[in-house]
Image (spheres, grey):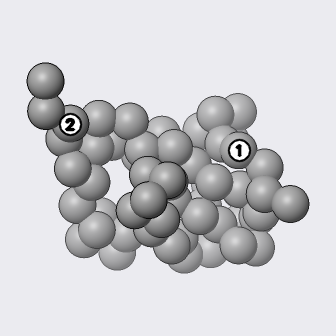
């Protein structure tokens, strides 16, 4: 079973749903990071899950 890769070009179209800030891609953790929002949005099967309820809070 192969995992679908996230296309970093998607970052051009995505922003944090809480702050509207640009996101950074963390390839190791498969997350999109919103530094202003202090949130990490998971990427599942190559698809970013941009729901605040699904995001991990960053310290």
Count of labels in the image: 2
- The answer to which image quadrant residue 14 occupies is bottom left
Q: Residue 30's x, y, as percent? A: 44, 52
Q: Which disc, if any, is residue 3? A: 2
Residue at image location 70% in from the left, 33% down from the top: 53
Disc 1 is placed on an element classified as: strand
Q: Residue 19's x, y, as percent? A: 71, 66
For the C terminus, the quadrant is bottom right
Closer to us: 44 or 52: 44
How far is disc 1 from disc 2 in space, using C-alphas? 21 Å
Closer to us: 51 or 32: 32
For mark 1, what is the residue?
56
Closer to us: 46 or 50: 46
Residue at image location 70% in from the left, 44% down from the top: 56
Circle 1: is it few (<14), some (14-19), or many (20+) Cα within 10 Å? some
Disc 2 is placed on an element classified as: loop
Q: Is residue 22 above or below residue 10?
A: below
Q: Is residue 48 left or right of residue 3?
A: right
- The answer to which image quadrant residue 1 occupies is top left
Q: Earlier in the sequence, mark 1 or mark 2?
A: 2
Q: Is residue 2 left or right of residue 52?
A: left
């Amino acid at each position: 079973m192969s995992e679908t890769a996230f296309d970093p070009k998607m970052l051009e179209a995505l922003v944090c749903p809480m702050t509207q800030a640009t996101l950074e891609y963390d390839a190791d953790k498969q997350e999109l990071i919103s530094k202003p929002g202090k949130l990490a949005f998971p990427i599942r099967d190559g698809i970013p899950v941009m729901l605040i309820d699904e995001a991990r809070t960053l310290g």
